[in-house]
Structure formats: C-alpha cells, structure tokens
Amino acid sequence: MAPLISIRSSNDKLEIVNQLLLPHVTEFLPIESVEDAHDAIKTMKIRGAPAIASLAALSFSQYLSRALKASPQPDFLASPEALKNHVEPILAYLYTARPTAVNLGAATRRLTNTLSSSIAAGKDTQFIVTDLILEGNAVADEDVGRNREMAKWGGEWLLKRVKDSGKDVSVLNVMTVCNTGSLATSGYGTALGLITYLHETGKLDKAYYTQTAPYHQGSRLTALELLTLNIPSVMICDTMVGSLFQHHDIHAVVVGADRIAKNGDTANKIGTYNAAVIAARHNIPFIVVAPISTVDLDIEHGSKIPIEQRPPLEACLVRGVLYPNDGKTEQVQVMITPPGIEGIYNPSFDVTPAELITAIVTEKGVAVKAEGESVFDLTPIV
C-alpha cells in the first residue's frame, strides 16, 4: 500500500485528505484560501498538531505566492508597512482555528518573526514576501526529518530502559492513544513514529491502540496507518486499558502531545490522562513524543493550557459504512444517543500531570525527571 499522507503540495496547488471520511473513503480536498485552511482545521478535516501547523503555514505561503503572480498586484504589496498591516491579521485568524495545539501558534509566531526581521533588515516588499513563502514551506518540510529523529531517540531509550529493568525480552508490546502518524504530521509520525521505528528495527511485537470513543476518529486513523505499515496491532476500547495491563505484558505507553507546559504537564487527546493513571498503577513507562514546537515554555503548568470544547453534537454522532449492503460501500452518519439529554461534556483534550510521565522526547533527545522530582527540566531538549 502507498504511504499515507495528510497534505499534498505542489507549486500553488494545495490539497488535504478529508480525515472525516477515512478509513472508508479517501477524498482529497483542494485548499484554495486561508479561509479553506481555517475551516479544514476547525472542522477536523485535518487533525494532529504538526499537520494543522503545516497546513496553516502552507496556505499562507500559497496566498502570498498567488499575490506575487497576480496582475495587477494587490495593494498590500505596495510597501513593507502595507504588507505588515495586511498579513498580521491573517496569521492571527489562522491561529484561532484550534486553541489547544501549540504547534499552530508556533508556526504563526515563526512567520510573524520572519516578517519583522525581514522588515528590520530593510528588505523591499518582494523580498519580504519571498522570505515568508520560504518560511511557510519550511514549517512543513522540516517535520518529517525531526519526526525520524525523535522516533530513534525514544525507541533507543525505551529499549535500554526495558533492558536495564532486567526484563529478558527481544521484542516489545507498546500501547498508544489517538493517531500520531503520517496523517497527523507531515510524515512518519511522533508517537506512532516511535512504534514504526521499533517495527523497522525488528524490536516490536505488537502495537495496541485505544478506541477512545465511538465518535473519535483518531483510533480509526491509527488502525489505517498500522495496516498500511503492516505493523501487527490490536485495538482496545479505552475502558479496557486496565484489563489489558492486568493480563498482557505491555512495555510502554507512548503518546503524542498538543501542548507541553514548562514543567512537563502534557495536553493530548482525551483519554490520555486515564491511560497514564493506569500505567502508573502498573509501573509501565509512559512516554510523550512531540516536536520542540509543542513545548510551551510560557505556560508554567498544565492548568494554564486552554482546553478546546468541541460542539456537543459531535459526541452524539458516529460515522461509518452500512453493513451489509450488497457489497456496496455507503458511508453514513448516525445519532447514537437519545434526544433530550440535559448536558454533554465534550472536551477534545485532557492534561496528564508531569508526575505520571516517565520521559518526554523531542528531536533533541530524551528528558527524564531528576531523582525525587515530580516535574521536568526540559531545557536540554528544547
């Protein structure tokens, strides 16, 4: 099977795979404007903190590239000041699409900083726009390489950890939560990248992944990615994690992150905190794998991380294909809850406290807590 991708970009053409329809239907949607990108991110047609940052940056580059080629050129290219006044609100608008994923904010700040430094250097408008286009493309291009780096760092650290614990095993069983593979990044993946690294080096027995809830797409995307990579895998309901740990030898839980606070508290897909609590009860290492752009040093601890509340209706719907239906693939969306429920609690993320996390991995290496400490010093890996 061909490798899965979340974004296709060539010249000024930009497309994303509509993840709402996966795994049953593969449909690429054209992104023709920053408004299209904002909608795709907000409605979760694309998901995964690195992937949404890449899409936002690429759509911004597309917008500027088309402006350079337009005849006549738009007024905002008349001067550096006009450019600044025009594009800063666009970057601010893109940032509003999803508030928890810090990668999106890191990408828009990176572009804002490029704008400011290019203006300060006295460049003319055409050169400033070129700088912004190149920087926007770089946000996506750099993702695959750093994912491979952190996968190797984390995989080798875990293998050593298991060996040092005295366990005589040649292959590992690893559990993950939500999707952190190629569909959630620009390629290879973060936590799923670590699992892929273990598989590629012959050190993985099985990958276990949680079905966080019927309406959450992440686990179905994980299933699709693991099947594509021919990685032996087992799906479990999130309410069965405790039973899994009681009856099977799980060597680690590996998850991604949407935002990591300065002390190591980590926001990730809802259900991650539950898994961390149970992993701690069973003395199973709990590892967070995420790029440096996910670490937010401006936030001291997890209580300051904004948690996105999704529309209540999303918790009542499930999408799939009718079965059986004379061999035809007909995708439907149905309501799974009765009408008249008084309230629906539907956060996208929860925060796992640093004390429950064994290690945090970025492309720069692996951080562990100092002896006797309950929080991390992330300085060496950011």
Image: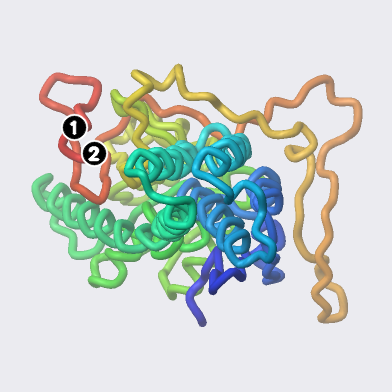
Above or below for 13 versus 243:
below
Q: CA distance from mark 2 to mark 1?
A: 6 Å
Rendered location of residue 23, percent (x, y): 65, 66
Image quadrant where residue 153 sits:
bottom left
Rendered location of residue 312, percent (x, y): 76, 32
Question: Foreground residue, 7 or 180?
Answer: 7
Rendered location of residue 62, percent (x, y): 58, 60
Residue 185 lies left or right of residue 364; in this view the side is right
Above or below for 81 versus 363:
above
Q: Amino acid at mark 2?
A: Val
Above or below for 39 versus 96:
below
Which color scheme does this rendered protein use?
rainbow
Image quadrant where residue 65 sits:
bottom right
Is the residue marked by circle 1 packed among few (<14), some (14-19), or many (20+) residues within 10 Å? few
Mark 1 element type: helix
**Label at residue 31:** none
**Label at residue 379:** 1
Image quadrant where residue 246 sits:
top left
Residue at (83, 60) in percent of width and height: 332
Residue at (10, 24) in percent of width and height: 371
Residue 348 lies left or right of residue 50; in this view the side is right
Q: Is residue 253 visible?
A: no
Rendered location of residue 175, percent (x, y): 39, 51
Please report contact status of discs 2 and 1: CB closer than 8 Å, yes or no: yes
**Location of the C terminus (image quadrant):** top left
Residue at (57, 40) in percent of width and height: 82
Number of labels in the image equals 2
Q: From this viewpoint, which residue is outermost toward the right?
A: 339
**Label at residue 382:** 2
Q: Amino acid at mark 1?
A: Thr
Residue at (31, 28) in percent of width and height: 264
